[in-house]
Image: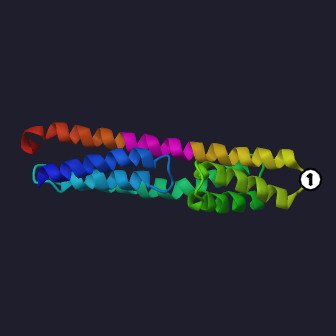
Amino acid sequence: MDILFLILGFICLFVSILGSFLPVLPGPIISWIGLLLLYFTNAVPANYWILGITFFITVFLSVLEYIIPAKGTKKFGGSSYGIWGTNIGLIVGILAPIPFGFIIGPFVGAFLGELLYDSKNHKRALKAATGSLLGFLASSFMMFLVCVIYLGLFLAIVWQYKSELF
């Protein structure tokens, strides 16, 4: 049973790295589940400090994932219309059956939102949409980094208890 938990945990961590770029898959959450599965084994004693701290980081980043693109829009001069457009575009982009909709959606949403606010200022709308895109890329990079760190933590724990696991 330990090997099953180990394999499932590793699969979760691998999938979470993909999920750090695809908003459909919650990368850090899947990664944390992979760590949790490791502690379900009989060989690895439960470490509630590691699980608690990583859980807090996971929840915090999951919230930030939706805030950062909107903040990027605001930072680049976007209005509340652009922020709403970013959020609506993110949801539409995730649900739309187009490639890279999760990237295109917030960009187009911020652009259209800014055009609703001021239809004559295309430059400002494009700048706000660029801020949305940069915010998305920044949040994706943070998710990727955390997922890779969780994978490293997983591998370090497996290495530490390799004699009991195998």
Quadrant (top left/top right/bottom left/bottom right) for the C terminus: top left
Could you say which is closer to the camera, residue 9 or residue 59?
9
Quadrant (top left/top right/bottom left/bottom right) for the N terminus: bottom left
- Residue shown at 31%/38% (left/top)? 152
Which image quadrant is residue 138 in?
A: top right
Residue 1 shows in the view: yes
Residue 22 coordinates in the image, percent (x, y) = 50, 50
Question: In the image, 15: left or right of 49?
Answer: right
- Residue shown at 58%/48% (left/top)? 100
Magenta residues, as a range? 138-148
Question: In the image, 101: left or right of 121?
Answer: left
- Residue shown at 13%/41% (left/top)? 161
Could you say which is closer to the camera, residue 64 or residue 11?
11
Q: Of helix, strand and loop, which one carries label 1?
A: loop
* Kind of residue indicated by mark 1: Lys
Magenta part, dominant SS: helix
Residue 52 coordinates in the image, percent (x, y) = 31, 56
Residue 159 coordinates in the image, percent (x, y) = 18, 36
Q: Does the magenta stretch include residue 20?
A: no
Could you say which is closer to the camera, residue 119 or residue 139?
119
Residue 24 coordinates in the image, percent (x, y) = 49, 57
Q: Does the magenta stretch include residue 145?
A: yes
Total marks shown come to 1
Question: In the image, 96: left or right of 55?
Answer: right
Q: How is the image coloured?
A: rainbow
Disc 1 crowd, CA 10 A, few/some/many (<14, 14-19, 20+): few
Residue 53 shows in the view: no
- Tell me the residue that label 1 is attached to: 120
